[in-house]
């Protein structure tokens, strides 16, 4: 039960943060859902970084990890809004834009997660080292 409270607190803050960022970036309806795309990409980066640095050197308690990782990030990012935006674009006969949104979201989202993980490893001194190949 305590875990749910921590997740709920993080979720409340994450939802408020998403609302604020979305209002700041895209206050009026536009064709491309830029605000949600940027929020989701930032979340991909953050979650990759966060789950890399917190189990080791920067260890935090499991409750705070749930609050930030699951609650905050889960509420800040939004898969459901992403899918509704894709369907909305398709319904407006913007099939190319909808497909572009899907491809960019998946490809750049995975890349942002990888960059977050690599940055976390670098911060912990675990970055892969390049070998000299002469």
Image (cartoon, rainbow, N blue to C red):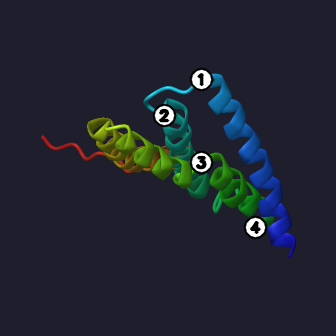
What is the residue that sits farthest to the bottom in this orientation? 1
Tell me the mark number nearer the camera, choosing from 4 and 1: 1
In the picture of the structure, the residue carrying the numbered disc 4 is: 62
Tell me the residue at 76%/58% (across/down). Answer: 67
- Name the residue beneath numbered marker 3: 77
Going from N to C along the chain, the mark reached first, 2 or 1, is 1
Question: Dot 3, crowdedness within 10 Å: few (<14), some or many (≥20)?
Answer: many
Left or right, 88 with respect to 22, comes to left
Residue under pointer 1: 28
Instruction: Tell me the residue at 59%/48% (across/down).
Output: 77
Q: How far is disc 3 from disc 4 in space, using C-alphas? A: 21 Å
Mark 2 or 3: the one toward you:
2
Task: Name the residue located 16 percent from the left edge and 44 percent from the top edge.
Answer: 133
**Any part of residue 115 in sight:** no
Circle 4/circle 1 CB separation < 8 Å: no
**Distance CA(mark 1)–CA(mark 3):** 19 Å
Which badge, 4 or 1, comes first in the chain's sequence? 1
Vertical placement of residue 101 versus 21, above or below: below
- Up the image or down, 79 lies above or below 61; here it is above
* Point 81% across, 69% down: residue: 4
Q: Nearer the viewer, mark 1 or mark 3?
A: 1
Q: Quadrant of residue 101?
A: top left
Q: Earlier in the sequence, mark 3 or mark 4?
A: 4
């Amino acid at each position: 039960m305590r875990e749910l409270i921590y997740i709920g607190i993080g979720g409340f803050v994450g939802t408020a943060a998403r609302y604020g960022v979305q209002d700041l970036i895209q206050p009026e309806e536009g064709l491309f859902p830029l605000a949600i795309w940027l929020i989701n990409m930032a979340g991909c980066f953050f979650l990759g970084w966060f789950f890399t640095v917190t189990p080791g050197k920067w260890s935090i308690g499991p409750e705070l990890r749930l609050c930030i990782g699951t609650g905050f990030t889960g509420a800040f990012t939004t898969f459901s809004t992403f899918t509704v935006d894709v369907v909305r674009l398709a319904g407006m006969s913007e099939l190319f834009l909808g497909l572009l949104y899907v491809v960019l979201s998946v490809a750049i989202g995975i890349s942002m997660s990888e960059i977050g993980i690599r940055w976390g490893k670098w911060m912990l001194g675990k970055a892969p080292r390049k070998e000299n190949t002469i």
